[in-house]
Amino acid sequence: MLKRTSRILLFAVILSFFGINYLFSFNNSFLSNYTPQKESIKDSTMIKAFNVLEQKCNACHQKKKPSLLFTMANMNTFAFSIHKEVFIRKKMPKGKDFPLTFEDEEALKLWLKSQDIGE
Ligand code: HEC
């Protein structure tokens, strides 16, 4: 009886050893496939666009349109409507308090382009 239990235990130990090894090898291949430069270029495009959304859009939306707050996690899903409101209909940013500078527009356009939207 005891023998059987210890055999099962040994089996479990061996299995978990391979499990841990698998996890680490997965991690290694993930790291070696990682291309830091490409990623950071893409990230900085998004971060620059998000800064515009945060300062020129969320600044007002949080009071006037709280159902539409942009985050790094949701901004890509709003890319289409942001492009439409800002560059086609030119309804946003609403009012005169949060005008977009040339750099703001360029940052948004570059990000929208990365989402295959715009020119
Ligand atoms: C001064 C306030 C204000 C600013 C600044 C502002 N918005 Fe808005 N936004 C609103 C309001 C209010 C609405 C709700 C619809 C309306 O009243 O036009 C809205 C609606 C929207 C909508 C939904 C449009 C629709 O009808 O479905 C989008 C997209 C949007 N804003 C994007 C932006 C973006 C992008 C910016 C920044 C570049 C921005 N907004 C800046 C007030 C603002």
Image: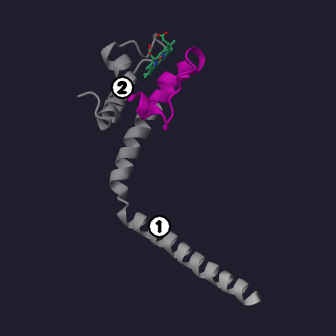
Judge by depth and name the residue closer to the eye, 80 or 37.
Answer: 80
Magenta stretch holds residue 55: yes
The magenta region covers 52-80
Sooner in the amino-acid sequence: mark 1 or mark 2: 1
Q: SS class of the residue under badge 2?
A: helix
Q: Is mark 2 within 8 Å of ligand 1?
A: no
Whether residue 42 is situated above or below residue 60 in the rendered picture: below
Q: Chief secondary structure of the magenta span?
A: helix
Q: Tell me residue 29's x, y (percent).
A: 40, 68
Q: Quadrant of the C terminus?
A: top left
Residue drawn at (41%, 16%), measured in percent from left and top?
Answer: 92
Residue drawn at (66%, 86%), measured in percent from left and top?
Answer: 7
Q: Is residue 101 visible?
A: no
Dot 2 corresponds to which residue? 80
Question: Of all residues shown, which one is farthest toward the front?
Answer: 1
Is the Cβ of the residue at disc 1 closer than 8 Å to that at disc 2?
A: no
Q: What amino acid type is highlighted by mark number 1? A: Asn
In the displayed structure, does residue 102 sit left or right of residue 75? left
Magenta stretch holds residue 30: no
Judge by depth and name the residue closer to the eye, 19 or 10.
Answer: 10
Q: Residue 37 bears which disc, if any? A: none
Q: What amino acid type is highlighted by mark number 2? A: Phe
Distance between the alpha carbons at the discs numbered 1 and 2: 35 Å
Q: Is mark 1 within 8 Å of ligand 1?
A: no
Q: Tell me residue 99's x, y (percent).
A: 42, 17
Q: Residue 27 bears which disc, if any? A: 1
Q: Is residue 4 visible?
A: yes
